[in-house]
Image (tube, grey):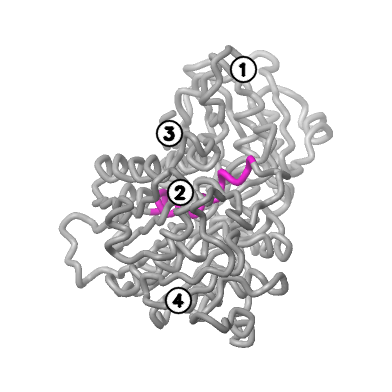
Amino acid sequence: MNTTVITRWQEKEPAALRVVPVIQSEREAVLARVAELIGISPAQLQEDFRGKENEILLLYPGGEGASAIRVALLGLGEKPQPQTVRSAFRRLVHQHRRQAAPSVVLDFSTWSGETPAGQPPLDVIIRAAVEGCHLGAHRPNFYKTRSGEDENISPPERLLCLVNQEHQAIARTAVKEGEILSDVLRKVMELVDAPSNRVTPEVLAETARKSGQLYGFTVEVWDREEIERRGFGGLLAVAQGSTVPPTFTLMEYRPVGARKQSLLRVGLVGKGVTFDTGGISLKSRDNLHLLKDDMAGAAAVLGIVEAAARLKLPVHLIGAIPATENKPDGSAVNPGDVITTYSGQTVEIIDTDAEGRLILADGLAYVAKNYQPDVLLDLATLTGAIMVALGQEAAGLFANNDDLAAALAQAGERCGERVWRMPLWEEYARQIESDVADVKNWGGRGGGAVTAAKFLEKFINGHPAWGHLDIAGVSLADSDFTKDKSATGFGVRLVVEYLKQLIR
């Protein structure tokens, strides 16, 4: 699906669908124009369509001289936000995929470009709309062998973004970003939704390799032997209960021709547990099949690096993915065991289901020590506690730097992936003090998301600008597009938006 920005629409394709997004406060003026376009009564249109969020009204040509194409009115509510715009356009394409037109016109020509208080600017809205249209064609049916209801259903061949002349430049940038981000997100969502026998640590590593070859960033993959040689005791401890070998993947992106010293350096570490049984501290069977998503942080980091490379962002990125399964066989690590991590610190294993922080500890310590990034971020489906605290509406943000926390929060609001800052008070560190080792990996149920972050903080080598994003509550979501919970790709938009702010 290709997207083109236009400033004038000539109705050469009768099969096209013209989508007119409508904000409730501007409903009367927009509907008057649409009524004239298709040859019906404005009063009737005002009565039939209120402009509520996700409201869709499909209209057909009226009398002589009217438009020859179908028009879809798409309600965006009173104050549209990126996430609601994205969802509305995705729902429109998904619901009308059987009657898909070869061309879909996104008509933003009625928008003035002025931004009312509380509403994102036009370029953000356009980017979200393009993302939604592209993702509306996404279906996670890649392993079906029989023809089903979605077989032979094709998305529109092209999108045409209709804007006023003065908005052409910002629209082109927004469309380009929307196309790239939606393509990256589709790949990330496919990785997270895929079963664990299809996406192993080695598959994650190979996916990174292929992406690097296509988009011009370097990728280095360590096998178990190299991981042992480097002393990644946290990753090895989690991996020892599985017959599937672990990997550690390092991605490095730097724009062609850029001087190393002139770029901001950002380190990213993503939790890559491709299936999590809990190990010896075994999980219950409820929704255990969804624990294939415990590598959503790793998938997001891969997506962020690819997106940055494709957008040619002037930033130096280091992406690290420690990847393994967490299984409970006879070789598995036991509660009470003591391990030595890459940093040299020892950890008492209290709960083998608190495994993500062990592999992140090695990844964070390695990136902090060997790359000295200006900013260090990790993304992980780390704790059930953050789901209790924040539900599915925001990721938990833990940061030791106020400017970093504020910038990530601002980026989240702008792109529609919200974060909520949680405390990192030193009092919580008492819960992870150990009698036998430097630290223990679990501090009890109370404040579980905070004590997990305090654990990670011990492995950042004193880094002054570190942020931890606990995405356990937002990596999967109930969806109108699938029967079960499905991947959201959370974190890609957020960090890409943050990087764009950072380099401004």
Answer yes or no: do the residues labelled 4 and 3 have beta carbons within 8 Å? no
Query: Foreground residue, 167 or 372?
Result: 372
Q: Where's the C terminus, which quadrant?
A: bottom left
Q: Position of residue 24 (x, y in %)?
A: 73, 47
What is the spatial separation of the Cα atoms under label 4 and label 3, in whole angstroms? Answer: 53 Å
Circle 3 Cα neighbour tier, 10 Å, few/some/many (<14 / 14–19 / ≥20): many
Circle 2 Cα neighbour tier, 10 Å, few/some/many (<14 / 14–19 / ≥20): many
Magenta span has 434? Answer: no
Task: From the image, tell me which residue sits under label 3.
Answer: 3
Q: Main secondary structure of the magenta part?
A: helix
Task: From the image, tell me which residue sits under label 2.
Answer: 299
Q: Residue at x 62, y 29 (%)?
A: 94
Q: Earlier in the sequence, mark 4 or mark 3?
A: 3
Location of residue 49 with respect to 422 vertically, above or below:
above
Task: From the image, tell me which residue sits under label 4.
Answer: 346
Foreground disc of the pair 4, 1: 4
Secondary structure of the residue carrying numbered label 2: helix
Q: Where is residue 500, by image quadrant?
A: bottom left
What is the spatial separation of the Cα atoms under label 4 and label 1, in whole angstroms? Answer: 60 Å
Answer yes or no: do the residues labelled 3 and 1 have beta carbons within 8 Å? no
